[in-house]
Structures are given as C-alpha cells and as structure tokens.
Image (cartoon, rainbow, N blue to C red):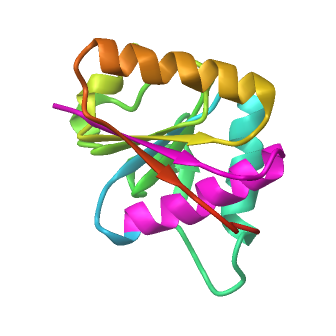
Amino acid sequence: MTRIDFYILPDTTLEARLDFACRLAETIARKGYRLHLHTESEAMARELDDRLWTFRPDAYLPHALLESEQAETVPVTLGWEAPPAPDRAVQALLNLSPGIPEWFSRFERVAEIINQHQDVLVAKRECWQTYKKRGYPVKAHQLRGQSS
C-alpha cells in the first residue's frame, strides 16, 4: 500500500515550498528512488525545473519535464497533467498540486508539502482526510527552522 508523508513547513511563501521540494527531491533521488514531481500547472513545473538547476551550487539532480525526450533517461521527472508511463517504474511521487492525482496509488511513496498559506492548508487538509478515509498510512513531519 502507498505510504503518504506530509511535510509541514513553518513558512508561508511559495518560494519556501518550492525550495523545500528541491531539497526533498534530492534526498529521495539520493536514496535511489525514481521520482515524479506533480505540479498544479505548467508554469509551476517550469519554475521548479529552473530551481532544480540552481537550488544548491554544489548539487546536480538529473531531471526533465515529462514531455521532453530526456524524461526517459533521468531519475526525476516533472509534470502537471499526465502521470509518467507505467513502464518507467517510478516509485515516488512528490505532489505539489492542490488535489490528489487519481493515479497516486501506483507509487510506493507519496510526499505532500504544506506551507502556512491558507489555500495550501485548506487543500492539503482535504487531501489528508481523503487518504485517511481510504485507509492509507499517513505520517506528518513537522519541520522547524527550514529556511532556504
């Protein structure tokens, strides 16, 4: 069964949420998981794509937009509508969209990032309740002092 982890940031900004997403993506990939970052829009996916190149000067996280030719060869993909192809064997999903993608249960792990912005709090509270109602194991990670 898919394991769900909620990472709760003390920050209110989208920038803090995306910066943490980059750090979490690096950690997940370093552990050997293939990862898909699901965003709410193409604009967010492209911004996150740019941030993954620059979030740490001493880091390189091979990644590509799901629609690109490179998506087949990198461990991390980004997208906003469709999931990665089932034959890609992606084990982890980092969900940055407000809702839960219908296809989330294909993954071993799902990470949700919450910041203290009211819209995100409301949307992710609903996600938490939906996962719990469906019987998925859900764990919260309260993060303190996570600055970018």
Q: Is residue 133 highlighted in magenta?
A: no
Please name the residue shown 33% across and 29% down the image: 85
Quarter of the N terminus within the rendering: top left
Whether residue 27 appears in magenta in the rendering, the answer is yes
Determine the residue positioned at 47% across, 52% down: 141
Image-quadrant location for residue 145: bottom right
Image position of 124 with respect to 68: above or below: above
Left or right: 39 in relation to 130: right
In this view, the residue in front, 134 or 87, is: 134
Relative height, residue 79 to residue 77 (above, below) = above
Residue depicted at 78% across the width and 46% down the height:
47
Q: Position of residue 64 (x, y in %)?
A: 56, 50
Residue 12 appearing in the image: yes
Task: Answer with the quarter of the image where residue 104 lies.
Answer: top left
Q: Residue furthest left?
A: 1
Write the residue at 64% across / 87% down.
58
Query: Magenta span covers which residues?
Result: 1-29
Residue 146, image x, y percentages? 68, 66
Residue nearest the viewer, comparing 145 with 75: 145
Labels in figure, total: 0
From the viewer's side, name the closer residue of 49 and 39.
Answer: 39
Residue 82 visible in the displayed image: no
Residue 116 x, y percent position in the rendering: 75, 40
x and y, in percent, of residue 143 in the image: 58, 59
Q: Is residue 111 above or below residue 40?
A: below
Q: From the image, which quarter does the C terminus lie in?
A: bottom right
Q: Residue placed farthest to the bottom in the image?
A: 58
